[in-house]
Image (cartoon, coloured by chain):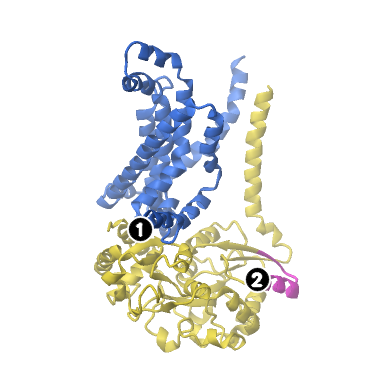
Chain colours: A yellow, B blue
Amino acid sequence: MNKLTRAFIAVFVVAFLLMYAVSELNGSDRKTAGNTLTIYNWGDYIDPELIGQFEKETGVKVIYETFDSNEAMMTKIEQGGTAYDIAVPSEYAIDKMKKANQLLPLDHSKLPNLKYIDKRFMDLPFDPHNKYSIPYFWGTVGIIYNKDLMKGKEIKAWNDLWSPELRNNILLVDGAREVMGMGLNSLHYSLNDKNKEHLLEAKRKLDELTPNIKAIIGDEIRLLMENDEAAVGVVWSGTASEIMWEKDNLEYVVPEEGSNLWFDNMVIPKTAKNLKAAHQFINFMLDPKIAARNAEYVGYSTPNQKALEHMPKDVVNDKRFYPSPEQTEHLEVYENLGADMLAYYNELYLQFKMHKK
Amino acid sequence: MNSKTRLFYLLPYVLWIGLFVVTPILLVVYYSFFDLHGNFTFANYEKLFTFVYMKMIASSFWYAFLITVFCLLIAYPAAYFITKTKYKQLLLLLVILPSWINLLLKAYAFLGIFSTYGAANNFLEVVGIGAQQILFTDFSFVFVSVYIFIPFMLLPIFNALDKLNPALIDASRDLGASAWTTFRKVVFPLTLSGVKSGVQAVFIPALSLFMITRLIAGNRVITLGTAIEQHFLVTQDWGMGSAIAVFLIITMFVIMIVTGTRKRGIQ
């Protein structure tokens, strides 16, 4: 009988542990009854000291969780298990969430610091009048290259990547929108193109690039570029600035045919329980000094105009990471393509990845 | 023992299997019949038989086959050698030891070893062959996969060889069989069960490898695992991802049946 009891206990213990885990995961519900704030942000995307400072100033207890893709974040908010008060989606995700009624409108009267945000980043097509979102960081997709390995040759455009001299020397970020967008842009099509002919043409053009591609990977690009593993990488501007922080002789360019301009934004998802603290937090992050400290820690570009005054001149005046409005004019923001079109993009991307050298 | 207590004994097992094995599989099968918009459809399975996915399936099988063959070629002699030595347990432990280390950690280690300025290329330079591109090639992918799977191949073969009665080999040699004939007619058939378990333990997981395809092969090798990951995390096309998963489950059953031994019955 002893064995049986043990077997029973084992099953029950596992079941209870799982139940406990579920209740813990969903637990922020109960906890938010007190004065707590649950934040859901990208990994390594805030200066952790600022959270402590916010807690001290307001007496609100912060629960901080991270995600690594817009899709993972949306799935979790859709399920509604956790009472997230703040999330930081990218622009096309905001459009999607808005349509799915997953966002709560913001009360601008509780966000006096909103006036510091550069007008250029307000009232964008994905969220007219900033009804649901406040810009957090912004940037571009571009090419980082190693000047030594390129032996003095410069890169200015996407089409330069097709040069036979770059054989087996390019690293691509593993993202369907980024890579397909690069193919479309190199043909001077929009990176939100929904014309299947154009998309097929872009895929065929990308297939021709395969001999030059060394690998299609994620965050490892940082490490590999720092170790001279490849001459060229296609990355987000923030990744580029982090790599360049570690290593000289690198250059970052936004290709002249056009590229992606992206925005990550603070929103209040419909799961929110503590609206007061959520607004307090957004307003806190909009404070110029706070925003400046955060931007210096994270390394991405802040949309906070006043914050630029509190930051080192050489950072702020670096046109590669703080391009002027004229420079970003020809760049495009990702639009929400809809589920079917996105699936088609991914289908082509998968085929491109399968294309052999 | 009456039937009531037997039922009682069975209950924990049934509960476990029901909750953690049957339910998830049923859920996967269920999801595989829905398209992006939640409509019932067979399109996911139709898509599985298009050229693109067929090519992907073929390449998954090809790489899984290569990995299994190399594992077998290395593990069988190694297991044979280990059973012949004095320090069986110690040597076995040394082979198994790397599998205690996190897979991700090992993959990142290879990223360093195989890189342009890594240890492997330094060695090639010293030997006089000169630096090669090792990382992000088919070679590095198969090599790292074989390295990871070897313990799973070696253990069952070792057990089978260890159980083999040495008197049988002596008898075979006494009756005039050469070493090679002895191996072919006596040793190998008697350890075939171990080889089959090893093949099952390597081939099936190798079909759906996905993390190594990205880290070590730089997405230059695409397997069914990569496609499942992309469908679940990026496209959010759970139907298509599930359909591929169902295909893999069916394949696994087929492999189990083909390689399963009669005595144990069909699994």
Q: Quadrant of the C terminus of chain A?
A: bottom left
Residue B130 is tagged as 1
Image x and y of residue A8, in percent:
65, 30
Q: Nearer the viewer, mark 1 or mark 2?
A: 1
Disc 2 is attached to a residue of which chain? A
Q: Residue at x 55, y 30 (%)?
A: B89
Image x and y of residue A16, in percent:
66, 41
Q: Residue at x 40, y 56 (%)?
A: B126
Disc 1 is attached to a residue of which chain? B
Dividing the picture into quadrants, the one containing residue B2 is: top right
| Gap between marks 1 and 2 measured at Cα | 63 Å
Instruction: Name the amino acid, label 1.
Output: Gly
Q: Is residue A321 above or below residue B249?
A: below
- Disc 1 secondary structure class: loop
- Disc 2 secondary structure class: helix
Q: Quadrant of the N terminus of chain A?
A: top right
| Residue A161 colored in magenta in the image | no
Q: Residues within 10 Å of mark 1 (few under 14, many from 20)?
A: few
Image x and y of residue A143, in percent:
39, 74
Image x and y of residue B52, in percent:
28, 52
The residue closer to the viewer here, B129 or A131, is B129
Q: Which residues are magenta?
A: A48-63
Instruction: Name the residue tied to disc 2.
Output: A275
Instruction: Name the amino acid, label 2.
Output: Leu
The residue closer to the viewer here, A321 or A19, is A321
Residue contact between numbered discs 1 and 2, judged by CB atoms under 8 Å: no
